[in-house]
Image (tube, rainbow, N blue to C red):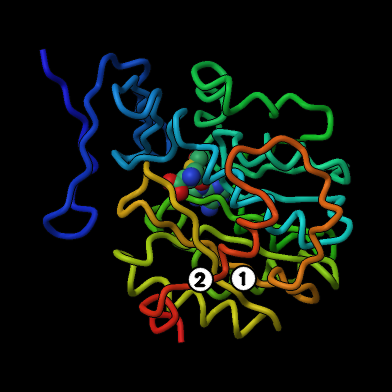
Amino acid sequence: MDLWFYERNIVPGLSLGLEVTSTVHSEQTEFQHLAIVDTKAMGRVLFLDNIIMTSTKFEFVYHEMITHVALNTHPNPKKVLVIGGGDGGAIREIIKHPRVEKAVLVEIDRRVVETAKEFLPEISCGLNDPRVEVLYQDGIKYVQEHQNEFDIIITDSTDPIGPAVGLFEKGFYESCRDALKEDGIFVAQTESPYYDVNLLPKVQKNTRDIFPITKLYLAFIPEYPGGCWSFTIGSKKYDPEAADLSNWPNYPTRYYNPGIHKAAFVLPNFVRELIK
Ligand code: SAM
């Protein structure tokens, strides 16, 4: 029997299909529909509301690139906050960095963390590390209640729908600025430069209005529509393009390295135009 799972209408007329070999888990949580399936092309895949979140085959690109660029820009990233990211992949990467003393994960949906621990152990394996604290609450509220505390804040969110809408709004960026220390760095996944052409300029403007240094960088991630994904950095002091990577800690990574760090900021002309 052929069974295909489709992320439908990414933009009108475009779907992404994966051939499924078995359904591992499926449930309606308080916040979203959660499914974990085994696929022929991408290994085990987590879907939230029928949108691909992560796959065991390609998650390393996303999770390395959402974390290590900022971690190796900041000279002393001791305390890191992740908003969303309940699969644990960003946390797994953050705790590779020898200077990190504490990583806090604030995930709105407890079931994402619980099912990732049960069915995606290679992604969630860092969540039980003693440096990691996992909290189940709305990340928007959490950052409003913390000031001058974090060296890095990472938004590893779902697309801007449902509880994640506010994670792309200016008010949230302002709260993140205030929750960061005076030399802190903010990073967010900011979707596809090919398909999210309305979101990207808005996020860039919001970030530029709030952080003195704002940069967009790209990574090539086959599991997401178009294969090219964007991340936005807002930094109070350190320019990620000027980071001195000659002494980076050189922990094991499969995508990130100092050359990729620098090259990721080289943008095609259409992307430059989009965020001008
Ligand atoms: N890498 C994925 C992608 O871009 O497709 C995103 C990872 S997914 C694990 C993002 C997580 O953000 C979800 O588990 C979702 O529950 C969580 N989330 C959404 N809105 C949130 C909010 N307001 N506060 C905290 N977590 C939130």
Q: Secondary structure at mark 2?
A: loop
Question: In the drawing, does residue 37 fall left or right of residue 246?
Answer: left
Residue 56, compared with residue 268, is above or below; it is above
- Residue drawn 83% across the image and 45% down it: 249
Quarter of the image for residue 12 reads: bottom left
Are dots 2 and 1 in contact, CB under 8 Å? yes
Of the pair 251 and 32, the residue shown nearer to us: 251
Instruction: Point out residue 104 in the picture as x, y percentages from the top left corner.
Output: 74, 43
Residue 209, compared with residue 259, is above or below; it is below
Question: In the drawing, does residue 208 fall left or right of residue 6?
Answer: right
Q: How many C-alpha atoms fall within 10 Å of the one at disc 1: few (<14), some, or many (≥20)?
A: many
Instruction: Point out residue 48 in the picture as x, y percentages from the top left corner.
Output: 37, 38
Question: In the drawing, does residue 60 fall left or right of residue 22?
Answer: right
Of the pair 216 and 200, the residue shown nearer to us: 216
Of the pair 135 and 156, the residue shown nearer to us: 156
Q: CA distance from mark 2 to mark 1?
A: 7 Å
Residue 3, compared with residue 17, is above or below; it is above
What label does residue 173 carry, if any? 1
Specify the amino acid type for callout 2: Glu
Quarter of the image for residue 229 reads: bottom left
Residue 226, compared with residue 103, is above or below; it is below
- Residue drawn 61% across the image and 70% down it: 173
Q: Which residue is mark 2?
A: 169
Instruction: Point out residue 193 in the picture as x, y percentages from the top left corner.
Output: 37, 67
Specify the amino acid type for callout 1: Tyr
- Residue drawn 65% across the image and 74% down it: 174
Q: How many C-alpha atoms fall within 10 Å of the one at disc 2: few (<14), some, or many (≥20)?
A: some
Question: In the drawing, does residue 89 fall left or right of residue 275?
Answer: right
Of the pair 217 and 232, the residue shown nearer to us: 217
* Quarter of the N terminus within the rendering: top left
